[in-house]
Amino acid sequence: MNPYNLSVLFFSFCNFLIGLLILLKRNDEIGKRYFIFSLAVTTWSFFFSLLINQNVSYQTALLSSRLCNVSAVFIPAVWLHVVLALTNRIKNYKKLLLCLYSLSILIDLFSFTPLFIPKVGPAVGFIHYTRPGPIFHIFVLMFFAIVPFTFRELFLKICKTRGEEQLQLKGFFVATFLGFLGGSLTFLPVYNIMFPQHTLFLLPIYPFMMAYFMIRHKLFDVEEIVQVFQREKLATIGLLAASVNHEIRNPLYVAKSNLESYIESEQERESDHRSIENSKKSLAAINRALEVITKLNRFAKPSDDSINCNRQASIPEALQTVLDLVSYEFQLDKIKIINQIDPNLPSIQADQRQLEEILFNLIVNACHAMENGGELTITASCHSEAEGRRISEPRSFASLRMTKTGSQTTDKIRIIIQDTGSGISQDQMKHLFEPFHTTKGDKGTGLGLYITKQLVERNGGKISVSSKPDQGTSFKLEFKILQN
C-alpha cells in the first residue's frame, strides 16, 4: 500500500456513496445516469488502485489495468449523458450519444486483448503501469474530445442560470473538474510522459465538495430546484407587474380621470351624442385595461402555502383571471376558447391564487400544443364520490352538496381542459409529471406540469391526463367542494 493507492481507493468508496445518495434523492433520468456514471468511475478507481499497488503480481496488475479501463471507456459517454440530461439538451445530441455508446461497446470487445492493453510496465515510481495498444489510442482520443466538450455544455448552462441554481451548478462544475483533472492526468505516463501523479490526491476532494454542496446548497435536490424555479418565476412576474403599474397603470388613471371629466362636461353642454358615445367606449376600454392590470397584480402575489381547511376558491373567477391574461396570445395563435364553466359553480377547498396558477399552467401548455391554431374547451361538472358517476339532473348546486349522512351526494367538482393539439405519445405520458421531463426541447424547463401536480395535490385535488398523438390532450382536475 502507498499514499497514492490509498487516496484512489478512498475516492472509489466515497464516489460510490455520492452516486447512491444522488440516486436516492432523485430517481429520475438525471439521478439514474449520474449513478451509472459513478459506477463507471468507481470501478475505474478501484482497479486503478490495485494497478498502482506495489505488492500485486504482474498478472494481477495486467488484469487490473484492463478492468479499470474497461469501465473508463464508458466514462465520456455517460458523463456527457448526465450533463445533457441536466441541461435538457439530450434531443440535440441524440445521435452523438448513440455513436459514443456504440464506440464504447466496440472498444470493450477488444478490452482483454493485446490490441487494447498488451502489457504493464514501470512508470513514475510505480512498478506496474498501463502500456497502450492501438485500440487504446481510440479511447484516449474519445476521452479528450468528449470530456472538454461536456464541460463546455455545463459552463453554458451555468451562464444561463441565476441565483441558487447557478451556485449549485458552479459547485458541481468545480467538484467534477477537480475529479477529472486528477484522473485524466493518469494518461500521461501511459505515453511515457513522466508527469508525477500527485494530482491523484485531488480525487478525494471531489466527494467532499459534492457532499458540501448537496448539504449546504441542496445540490440535486428536486424540491429545492422547484422552489428556486418558482421563486424566480414569481419574482419575474412581480417585476413585470411593478413595471406595468408604473409605466401603464398610472398614465391610464390620468387618462381615465380626464376622459370622465370630458364626458361629464359634454353631457352638461348636451354636445354631439356620437362624440359622447365614442368617449364612453374609450373609457370602457381603459377600465378594461385597468381591470386586467389589477388581475396581473393579484396573480403576481405569492400564494398562501399554509394548510388551511377553510380556504375557498372560485373556479369561474380563477378561470376568468387566467383567460384575461392569455386571451391576446390565443387570438394571435388563432385558438378558439370554448368556456363552458357555469358561473354558479360552488366554491372548492383550495387556495385561489394556487388554483389560478394551476389553470394558467395547463391553459398555456394547451396553447403551446396548438401551434397551428385549434380549439380549447373548458368544462366543469359535479359528481358523486359515492355513486362514482356524474350527476346531470337539473338541480341547483346547493342541493347537490353532501348531506349530513353523506349518502348519494355530490362532493367533488371535475374540471376538464381539452385541446385539439398535437397530442402526447404513450412513452411521454409515462413521464409527463416527472421533474425535468419536457417535450419542448430548449424552450421547456420540464418543471411546469410537475409543479402543477404538486399544487393540485397540495390543495387536496387530483390530476390525470389522456391523450393520443394528433388527436389532442385532455387534462382532468378534481377538487372537493367547500362544505358549509
Image: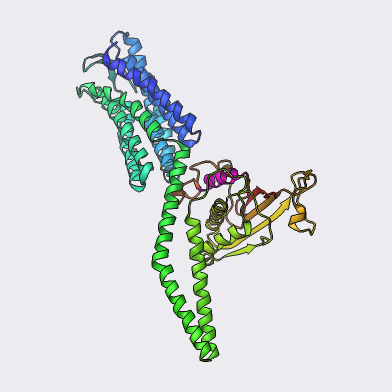
Residue shown at the point (47%, 84%) measured from the top left: 262
Residue shown at the point (57%, 45%) measured from the top left: 453
Stretch in magenta: 448-461
Q: Position of 213 compared to 451: left or right?
A: left
Residue shown at the point (35%, 11%) measured from the top left: 60
Q: Position of 454 compared to 129: left or right?
A: right
Residue shown at the point (58%, 49%) measured from the top left: 424
Label count reads 0
Q: Position of 413 compared to 228: left or right?
A: right
Viewer-proximal residue among 157 and 454: 454
Viewer-proximal residue among 315 and 126: 315
Question: Residue 345's spot in the image, x, y percent?
Answer: 68, 57
The majority secondary structure of the magenta stretch comes to helix
Question: Residue 158's spot in the image, x, y percent?
Answer: 34, 43
Residue 458 occupies quadrant? top right
Name the quarter where the N terminus is drawn.
top left
Q: Is residue 394 above or below residue 203?
A: below
Viewer-proximal residue among 203 and 121: 203
Question: Residue 250's spot in the image, x, y percent?
Answer: 41, 69
Viewer-proximal residue among 90 and 383: 383
